[in-house]
Amino acid sequence: MRKINQKDIDTRLTKVIRDLSDPKLYDLVCHEHRLGEPMPSIDKLAKMVDKIRQVIFPGYFGDINLNLGTIEYYIGVMIDEVFELISEQILAGLCFSCNESERPEMLQLEKDASQIATKFIEGLPEIRRVLTTDLNAAYLGDPAANGIGEVIFCYPATRAISNYRIAHHLLKLEVPLIPRIITEMAHSETGIDIHPRAEIGEYFSIDHGTGVVIGSTSVIGKNVKLYQGVTLGAKSFPLDENGNPIKGIPRHPIVEDNVVVYSNATVLGRITIGHDSVIGGNVWVTNSLPPHSKVVQVKSRQAEFVDGSGI
């Protein structure tokens, strides 16, 4: 290898630094920090979600040996920590998404963040109640589950649905950006992609889970079960007069109560899957189905290959 001297190295590194500092190259990917404003932090959000999980499922997570005689003290300490973390991250989300021309005073943003954080904390009992129905659905729907504790500890869907329920509550409180980060954290960990804007009813379960995609305008009723690889997605997007996708329009399926969708099924578009329907594995559904429908793929065709022919 040709030897290079220190001067060569300095010259080449200086050119890279100059190129990376050229506004034409970082215009779309640079966010200028404003003095004193927090930024959304994945590390702090992960810590916050862990604390919330310790509150919702007391005794399962964390380093403290729970004593039921002191549970109120335990919950109080956790709630205090959650409030501090969520207040800061809500403020970060508000600051990050503020329109510069309509920017409120920092003091007002801090008050807004505290009020939203308080409303979020008030919603935790309801989040726990709904998550309890999800745990029951997973336990009762899976012969391999030996108890609710196993579902809490081991099932990736528990983590994904927990993050979704937390994020969805924050989204309903009009917190920007933070809800999406929370569900994408679970997506990275479990392979289950649930958009926080989706509406999902009680007793929701996902078996195995990897590869499940639930789009942002999906509406899922009560007692719905999805298997791994299921997609509740959109068809092609309508475009505006400038050729850009029109955002925010309903474009994902409505899945009514008591529907089961088996593995790797793909359900696309703003269609309605009627209640008590069953969609078999590996099928594509792009039209609405009446209640009590059953859709399965055509019977597989058996063929024989000799010496690799036909493969």
Image: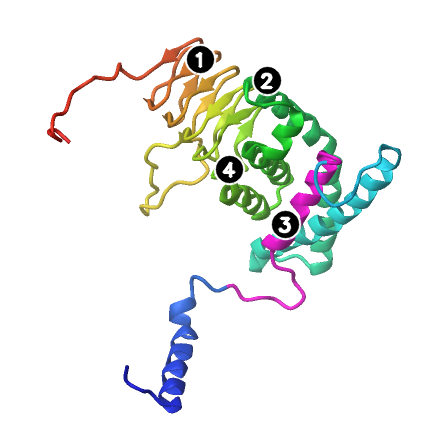
The amino acid type, in three-letter code, at marker 4 is His
Q: What stretch is highlighted in magenta?
A: 31-59
Precedes in sequence: disc 3 or disc 4: 3
Q: Quadrant of residue 58?
A: top right
Q: Distance between the residues labelled 2 and 4?
A: 26 Å
Residue tagged 1 = 277
Q: Gap in Å between the C-alphas at discs 3 and 4?
A: 17 Å
Q: In which quarter of the image is the N terminus?
A: bottom left
SS under mark 2: helix
Residue 147, image quadrant: top right
Between the C-alphas of marks 4 and 1, the distance is 23 Å
Drawn side of residue 81 relative to residue 165, left or right: right
Q: Position of residue 291 (x, y in %)?
A: 44, 10
At x 57%, y 32%, the residue is: 155
Reading the image, the residue beneath label 4 is: 195
**Is label 2 or label 1 in front?**
2
Q: Which residue lies furthest to the top in this view?
A: 292
Foreground pick, 251 / 262: 262
Mark sitting on residue 306: none
What residue type is disc 3 on? Answer: Leu
User: What whole-number distance in Å separates the C-alpha atoms at marks 2 and 3?
Assistant: 31 Å
Tell which tag, 2 or 3, sits nearer the viewer. 2
- Reading the chain from its start, which is encountered first: label 2 or label 4? 2
Q: What residue type is labelled 2?
A: Leu
Does residue 48 show up magenta in the picture? yes
Residue behind mark 2: 140
Q: Are marks 2 and 3 in contact (CB under 8 Å)?
A: no
Q: Where is residue 44 in the image (x, y as percent from the top left)?
A: 65, 53
